[in-house]
Amino acid sequence: MGERPVLVDVEDGVCWITLNRPDKLNSIVPEMLDMIGEALEAAESNRDVRCVVITGAGERAFCAGADVSYLSGLSSSEAEETISRKGHGVIMKILRLSKPVVAAVNGYALGGGCELAAACDFRIASDKARFSQPEINLGLIPGWGGTQLLPRLVGATKAKEMLLTGAMMGAEEALQAGLVTKAVSADSFEEEVKAFAKSLISGPPVALAEAKRLVNLALDLEPGLDSEAEAFGRVLSTADFREGVAAFKDKRKPEFRGE
């Protein structure tokens, strides 16, 4: 894959995890999920780390989700296990991490990228950020927790709008909807993210960990995630998904038939 697709750097109490495929809008392939998971595990065990920030390389994207070219070659069972459940593993590691996790969204957060951000404790968005769950346009559904996380963040009605229409929202709309913690100017984005992380690392670690654990306990995500993974595998095996991918590659409108 060339240069390492996930970069990890620890500086002044903050673990920076950077998705590093800017030429592919930082889209994710399975090996990257392993790398993110390993970085989170290392951050958990490192006493010097008090906060984690996940961001994307370049100026265009935080993460454009799973690499569609990889998805199209999978069977239903492969999609469920190697994509959805593996992605859920990363989502749960973020949720269970005893340290706060911030998504620094500097551009497009699409599909799995939106889900990755939604799993974080906080989302700081540049005014260039754009959020969407466009899987429906491929004849697919989210597979990394979107069906479970979004209703808890933005409510059922807004979540259905995102999931059923693929609608895209900017940083300000995402802020009003409750998806974003803070929307800032692109010019001051890096400075704002660092200041927010600094405010977290100055807090009491044990109390922060307990507060996060108890809030996430109330979410009770795992039963829904299990159902999502099964549904993701089923939907990926449909003719509609194959048509959606073909239309995406041909840059045309798909013709879905419910098959």
Image (cartoon, helix red, strand yellow):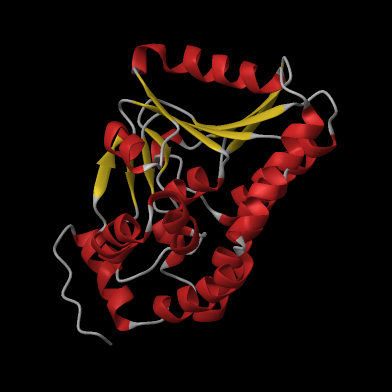
Q: Give the vertical position of 134 relative to 84 (above or below).
A: above
Q: Is the C terminus in the top left, top right, bottom left or bottom right quadrant?
A: bottom left
**Residue 90 seen in this snapshot:** no
Residue shown at the point (36%, 12%) measured from the top left: 187
Q: Quadrant of residue 78?
A: bottom right
Q: Is the N terminus in the top left, top right, bottom left or bottom right quadrant?
A: top right
Between 67 and 138, the one nearer to me in the picture? 138
Q: Quadrant of residue 80?
A: bottom right
x and y, in percent, of residue 41 in the image: 77, 43
Residue shown at the point (39%, 39%) measured from the top left: 25
x and y, in percent, of residue 164 in the image: 28, 65
x and y, in percent, of residue 193 in the image: 52, 20
* Residue, far bottom: 259
Q: Count the numbered circles shown.
A: 0
Q: Give the vertical position of 65 relative to 186 (above or below).
A: below
Between 67 and 216, the one nearer to me in the picture? 216
Residue shown at the point (24%, 52%) measured from the top left: 167
Q: Give the vertical position of 54 relative to 82 (above or below).
A: above
